Amino acid sequence: MASTLWDKGGVSDALMMRYTARDDFRLDQRLLAYDLKATAAHVRGLGRIGVLNADEVQKLTAALGDLAVENAEGRFLLTERDEDGHTAIEMRLQDRLGDVGKKVHTGRSRNDQVLVAMRLYERDAIDEIATHAIVGARALLDLAEREARTAMPGYTHLQRAVPSTVGYWAAAIAEGLEGSLFSLAAARSLVDQSPLGGAAGFGVNLPLDRDGVSKDLGFARVAVNPLASQSSRGIVEAMVLSACFHAMAVVRRFAWDISLFTMSEMGFVKLDDALTTGSSIMPQKRNPDVIELMRAACSVVVGALNEVQTIVALPSGYHRDLQLTKGPTMRGLDETIATVSLVPRVLKGMTLDRARLAAAVTPECFATDKAVDLAVAGVPFREAYKKVAAEISGLAQGDPLASIDARTSFGSPGNLGLDELARRISELEKSFAVA
């Protein structure tokens, strides 16, 4: 194993080292670009306060730039010999620059080093999720506009309830994704503050340029109290994963609906063959596996969130327990990115059977309209309700679109409010660095 950053002589137990290092080298591979970027900002900050001279800053930043290129090209690979990415960076700087490389860690701890790398990584991941959520919401709004008068039943308790439209259903999913953007924006705001300069959680006896380093890394602000920063690790990750859950819960509902709509018994939607798989034994089968996995994926995020939440029952300060929050955080973010990104593809690959949708709006769907009409005519609503209930079997078929057109309050099937939803999504888009 490479020398550790904390080596002070003596021999560490090999089994203990493997147990504590775990798979950190694999996880840190994903953080390496962020760690290199933050290290370069730290070096420039040390130069501004005179701890490093101009020549040392130039050599260190040049070497870090070279390592960044090697990492981007897949040539800077961490192995089990590296305790973590921080060790690997520092050892490579020492190999290339000798004593100058040994100066890079001045005024810094691995604690704030991993914090800043995670914050930079999480910020980018949140922006990517938001981008997919926005694209998906807009695709749903497009569908809502196209199918605003495509009749279908509205359901409660999985039973036909009242006449509705495909456009109304699509707008509901779009607004769900719009709501998830609020959660993502809140998580991003919490992440978007620099913990660098806090060292092990108690600052250092140097006038570190924390504000300058924060601006260098594009953070919105500096996290003030280093102990609070160290103690926030895991709690912040839980908030990030909670925001992921918000988006994934909406996508799970979308996937569940599509699963039902594609059943032979409903037949409202047909998926392109490219979105289905076949049975290994039943020749007739085309299975909506991608939809089912989108439905299940929310559980991966819930599991990651629960894992992180149970780890962070800790006193103030850094504890090695927090290392174990890194894996589930990455797993939850990966699952969210992969799943939310599929919403537009599914929408593009589904065909509506408008005749079957309309035929499913059967006479009992008009019972509520009939009761309301009687109430408007002067019959007390509770009496009207009972009268219609007694006549359900004899109700005549109504006009679905007439029922829709009668419901014109803002946001209802006859007045979807799509322009307002689009405006809100555009406003929320400003909270993210979206592509």
Image (cartoon, rainbow, N blue to C red):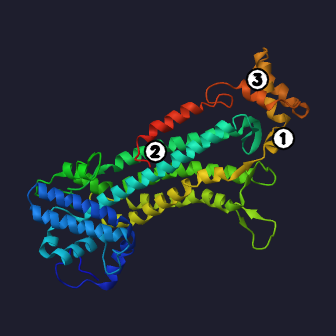
Residue drawn at x 70%, y 26% is 407
Rendered image: mark on residue 186: none
- The reply, left or right, for residue 405 in relation to residue 248 is right
Mark 1–mark 3 Cα distance, whole angstroms, equals 23 Å
Residue 328 location in percent, x, y?
Answer: 45, 63
Residue that numbered label 2 is attached to: 183
In the picture, which quadrant includes the N terminus?
A: bottom left
- Compared with 151, 280 (above or below) is below
- The reply, left or right, for residue 47 in relation to residue 32 is left
- The reply, left or right, for residue 392 in relation to residue 27 is right
Give SS at disc 1: helix
Identity, as a three-letter code, of the amino acid under mark 2:
Ser
Closer to us: mark 3 or mark 2? 2
Q: Which is more N-terminal, label 3 or label 1?
A: 1
Give SS at disc 3: helix
Rendered image: mark on residue 372: 3
Residue drawn at x 73%, y 26% is 405
Residue 403 location in percent, x, y?
Answer: 76, 28
Using a 10 Å C-alpha cutoff, classify the residue at mark 2 as few (fewer than 14 neighbours), some (14 to 19) or many (20 or more): many
Rendered image: mark on residue 359: 1
Residue drawn at x 38%, y 66% is 30
